[in-house]
Image: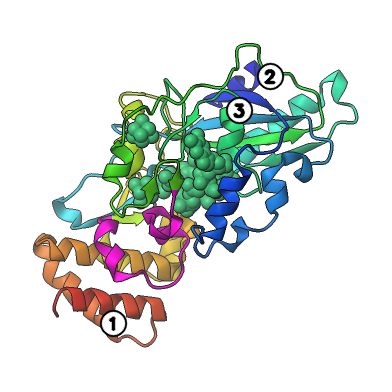
Amino acid sequence: MRACLGLGFAAAGIARAEPSAWGDAVRAWLAAGKHGTMEWMGEYLEQRLDVRRLLPGARAVVIVADAYGAPGDAAEPEHGGARGPLGVIARYARGEDYHAVMRRRLGRLADALRAMPAARCAEFRLFADTGPVLEREQAARAGLGWIGKHTLLIHPQRGSWFVLGGIATTLELAPEPDAAPIADHCGTCTRCIDACPTGAITPYSVDARRCVSYLTIEQHGSIDESLHEGIGDRLIGCDVCQDVCPFNRGTGVPPVSPSPHSSRAALPLLEVLGWTDADRTRVLAGSAAKRATLAMIKRNALIAAGNALANGGGGDRAAALRQRIAQLAADDSEDAVVRDTARQVLARLGA
Ligand code: B12
Ligand code: SF4
Ligand code: SF4
């Protein structure tokens, strides 16, 4: 594991390749439709529930965590001021796309493992977010932390501001002797559940259809009006359940790439509402935020603008914002989801 830390990972561990202990919970989550439109969550389900189906003969799973910055770092958004009402981007999506960073370093780790004498005929399968692997469960088994009530993996000292990835291998790798699973420290705390702006969390389960992260990045169509207020000023993703978690207080974990894109922490809504696809590509180049299409980002910006105006915000940009929303509602060249959302927002504002 020293090799993993040498590559810059914040934490690492080894889990035995075994079937999920939560297969019934995952199936029930899918059966209840809590994955929303993420149909891909139901695909390769057998592989997701047992890594040995993903890589036949797998014996071990190396799991790594990449820290991506915590509150108080250089990428904190500055609200108000001359830039007008802002739309906030979740922390994981501010710097370089973690998928790329993670895959690059996992590749180096795989090379190091391949160089081991015992690895001559071994096979390796890298995954970082998109593979059919229950990454948090693997990480919990590897002793990196426990799964909190908000369903994210929490490291007892480092909190949850990190992303996960790993390598399944047919190589026999023994878990570290002191890597026993870490007990659930949530206790009677319910801060994440109470603070979630859309009531998406029941202990140890998130209904994606209500989660702001899903609504802003994964859902392509219009967003039900009952959820608009809860979206608040969020443009891409949501950090609320992690912001309030006591285990994220003062973790001081240095981010992997020290906030090179702090300008991306929040974007002026009026500007975003005027974007072309070229603007989106330029501003979000190389970031995980580019997963959201132009229409989705404009939809999110309209909702955030509606929230600012409904609360009497917007300052000297309020009139221009209203005007832009009305323009978008009437613009037939705009995507249907943008037009529909602009109309929803105007109706809410009584315009
Ligand atoms: C689909 C998905 C989403 C969906 C659904 C979220 C979810 N909770 O499942 C949406 C789009 C909403 C989402 C949002 C976010 N995501 Co996401 N997401 C994923 C993805 C691709 C799959 C997750 C999954 O398998 N869900 C299936 C359901 C059934 O899982 P579950 O309900 O949590 O059940 C599991 C456990 O909780 C356990 N379980 C079930 N019941 C019980 C009961 C008890 C008592 C216990 C202990 C456990 C337990 O069993 C299940 C199997 O492990 C993973 C990457 C991966 N391949 O793992 C990233 C991942 C979980 N996401 C991640 C991140 C960073 C986020 C966001 C913070 C991004 C943001 N800032 O906007 C938010 C956080 C929202 C939240 N509170 O979950 C990170 C989490 C890192 C960490 N520290 O844990 C991951 C691991 C991506 C990565 N590679 O780093 N995400
Ligand atoms: S990411 Fe936001 S909306 Fe989703 S569960 Fe956490 S607090 Fe709720
Ligand atoms: S906020 Fe409280 S309940 Fe939620 S994950 Fe953190 S410790 Fe657990």
Q: Quadrant of the N terminus?
A: top right
Taking 36 as reference, is 269 left or right?
left
- Amino acid on which the number 3 mark rests in the picture: Arg
159 horizontally vs 315: left or right: right
Q: Which residue is mark 2?
A: 175
Q: Which secondary structure lies at badge 2?
A: loop
Q: Which amino acid type corresponds to the residue marked 1 in the rendered image?
A: Ala
**Foreground pick, 349 / 81:** 349
Q: Specify whether residue 218 is painted magenta.
A: yes
Mark 3 to mark 2: distance in Å? 10 Å
Q: Looking at the image, which is closer to me, 271 or 293?
A: 293
Task: Say whether disc 2 or disc 1 marks the residue closer to the N-terminus.
Answer: 2
x and y, in percent, of residue 281 in the image: 47, 61
Q: Is residue 93 left or right of residue 106?
A: left
Q: First in sequence: mark 1 or mark 3?
A: 3
Stretch in magenta = 206-233
Q: Which residue is mark 1?
A: 329
Q: Nearer the viewer, mark 2 or mark 1?
A: 2
Q: Is residue 94 visible?
A: no
* Mark 1 C-beta to ligand 2 under 8 Å: no
Q: Are marks 3 and 2 in contact (CB under 8 Å)?
A: no
